[in-house]
Amino acid sequence: MIIIGIDPGIATTGYGVIETPFLKLRTKTIKSKMKKAKVAKNTAGFSCLSYGLIKTTPSFTTAERLYKLSRELTKLINKYKPEALAIENVYFFKNLKTAMPVSQAKGVILLTAAKKKIPVFEFAPLQVKMVITGYGRAEKRQVQEMIRILLGLDKIPSPDDAADALGIAICCALGIKQA
């Protein structure tokens, strides 16, 4: 199964594409998932197919930025043919200036997935941290190191938005209940 993880934003949207041997998105308990994950030697059986950023230019209008986001996401979907899209679900923002653009970007992402008939799964940041590290308040560096280990990468994925997107995809692959 191929899953694309998304960390939404209007200036930068992180994406991470993974492949997982798990056939179902959900199983009964985290423990059973983790036992299954230990089948492979140094990873959870995941393969990292790609990760990076979709960037938009500040000089563009909001509409142009959202259009570019949709176009670039569509290209990724057409290339990797994911069977699921996992996206960060943010419940609160420190300021309204950030909330509106992120919400607009998320709306475009959800619409793009719906047009392609891809099921969407949403996960809160604390939930992703809990799944990846076993601790919901883990530091970003701890989460990134576990992502590196789970995917069998030589180095921590960067930039942060792309690493977060990979973590969201892994969370989906492990079938944790949605936020």
Image (cartoon, rainbow, N blue to C red):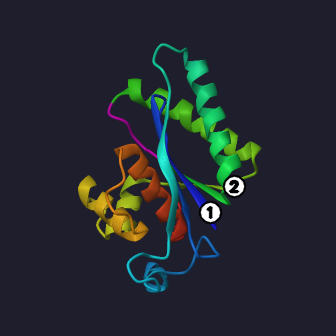
Q: In which quarter of the view is residue 91 placed?
A: top left
Give the residue number, with chain letter if any, for mark 2. Answer: 81
Q: Is residue 179 magenta?
A: no
In front of the other: 113 or 136: 113
Rendered location of residue 15, percent (x, y): 50, 47
- At label 1, counting other C-alpha atoms closer than 10 Å, the crowd grade (few under 14, some 14-19, many 20 or more) is many
Taking the image as drawn, is residue 88 in sight? no
Locate residue 147 relative to residue 7 in the image: left or right: left
**How far apart are the alpha carbons under marks 2 and 1?**
7 Å
Badge 2 vs badge 1, beta-carbon distance below 8 Å: yes
Taking the image as drawn, is residue 131 in sight? yes
Q: Amino acid at mark 1?
A: Ile
Q: Determine whether 119 is above or below 21 in the image.
A: above
Region rendered in magenta: 89-94
Q: Quadrant of the N terminus?
A: bottom right
Give the residue number, with chain letter if any, for mark 1. Answer: 2
> Residue, x 32% and y 68% (percent of image)?
133
Q: Determine whether 61 is above or below 135 in the image.
A: above
Q: In which quarter of the view is residue 70 placed?
A: top right
Rendered location of residue 5, percent (x, y): 52, 53
Main secondary structure along the magenta-highlighted residues: loop
Q: Determine whether 160 is above or below 153 in the image.
A: above
Q: Earlier in the sequence, mark 2 or mark 1?
A: 1
- At label 2, counting other C-alpha atoms closer than 10 Å, the crowd grade (few under 14, some 14-19, many 20 or more) is some
Q: Determine whether 2 is above or below 102 in the image.
A: below
